[in-house]
Amino acid sequence: MLSRTAAALYWLGRYLERADFIARLVEATIRLDALSARPAGEAAWQSALIVSYTDEAFALTGQTTTQAHVAKFLTLDASHPGSIVRCLDMARLNARAVRTALTREAWTAINRAWLIFQNRASPGGSTQTLNLVEAAKAEIRGFEGSIHRMMRNEATLLIQLGAAVERADNTARLLDVKYHILLPAGEEVGGAVDRDQWTTILQTVSAVNAYRWLYSDGLKTVNVIDLLISRPELPRSLAACVEEVVDLLSQLAKRTGLQGEADRMARSRMQRMQKTRTSEVIVSGLHEYLEAFIAENALLDRAIARQFRFI
């Protein structure tokens, strides 16, 4: 496989996973703002910008941090790389470069997701925005389903590898921002606003039912953190993403013969995570732990690029 083909497949997985996450983030923020015991307002939308690394780009627009402005910025503004439309643009561009490696169903799902956002001037009000992001999520789920029905070869493995690396980064950033930024000043930990926000975090990663299955003592911060970091049963947890990356790299090594730095980094990270205890992470500093994880994930991404000769 040509290096540019491998890069296109890997980044196709990353961009679609990123588009799905931003859609989930917009949906969760709308629901948080509407359903909180005390409306979260500007703080909630500012946190959405921070978790998507778009706060500086948004500040340059000079707009106020309201639902109308931020929702449009995160869904339809193609001027920055953190919007859904920009992610879908890049995913479609990469998909066109490897069109022959994709099934008709996979290409159609990408194209339909892209078409949803074309020629739209505004995402609309809350209901219209929720419908918009839900439509995007449905098409991305359709793409994911088509990938699982494709032939298991280097193409599907590289797409899934990109998605797993991106998913780990998204979960770590989401958890970090909630723990340190989102709770308004003066609100108590464990209070109504805090509970609403943790529930919204679980909704963002589709983990409400998983939490109820795994923890029987009600909503507790330490349990949510444990679920999102250490429980491999949850596909979006850090532990699950870390294990998936190791497995995918191992399968790619068998098929391509390319094995090296990325495999060693991924296995080392998995071994350390298997020994990680949530209580120890909280005591030693959750923010520091997540910052280190995000930095290591970026280093792994670059190691993958070198190993498969993307660069």
Image (cartoon, rainbow, N blue to C red):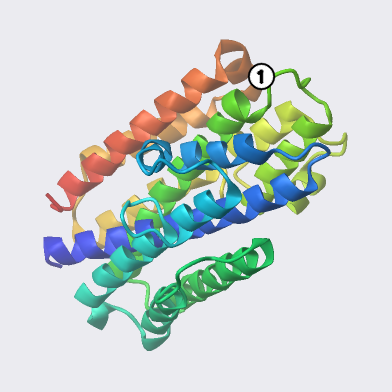
For this view, does 176 lie left or right of residue 128?
left
For this view, does 193 lie left or right of residue 282?
right
Say if residue 98 shows up in the picture. Answer: no
- The quadrant of the image that shows the N terminus is bottom left
Kindly give the residue lying farthest to the bottom in the view shown. Answer: 104
Say if residue 152 shows up in the picture. Answer: yes
Q: Residue at x 20, y 48 (%)?
A: 305
Quick one: 24 or 215, which is closer to the camera?
24
Residue 7 placed where, x, y %?
Answer: 21, 59
Residue type, label 1: Ser
- What residue is pinned by disc 1? 279
For this view, does 238 lie left or right of residue 94?
right
Residue 110 placed where, x, y %?
Answer: 40, 76
Kindly give the residue lying farthest to the right in the view shown. Answer: 217
Q: On the image, which quarter does residue 199 sit in?
A: top right
Q: Residue at x 35, y 29 (%)?
A: 295
Quick one: 209 or 244, which is closer to the camera?
209
Q: Residue at x 39, y 64 (%)?
A: 85
Q: On the image, which quarter does residue 221 sit in?
A: top right
Q: Is residue 221 above or below residue 305?
A: above
Q: Badge 1, how many Cα within 10 Å: few under 14, some, many 20+? A: some
Kindly give the residue lying farthest to the top in the view shown. Answer: 284
For this view, does 309 lie left or right of residue 158?
left
Quick one: 7 or 119, which is closer to the camera?
119
Q: Residue at x 57, y 69 (%)?
A: 132
Q: Is residue 141 above or below residue 165?
A: below
Residue 286 placed where, x, y %?
Answer: 56, 21
Residue 146 placed where, x, y %?
Answer: 46, 78
Quick one: 107 or 178, which is closer to the camera?
178
Q: Is residue 123 above or below residue 64?
A: below
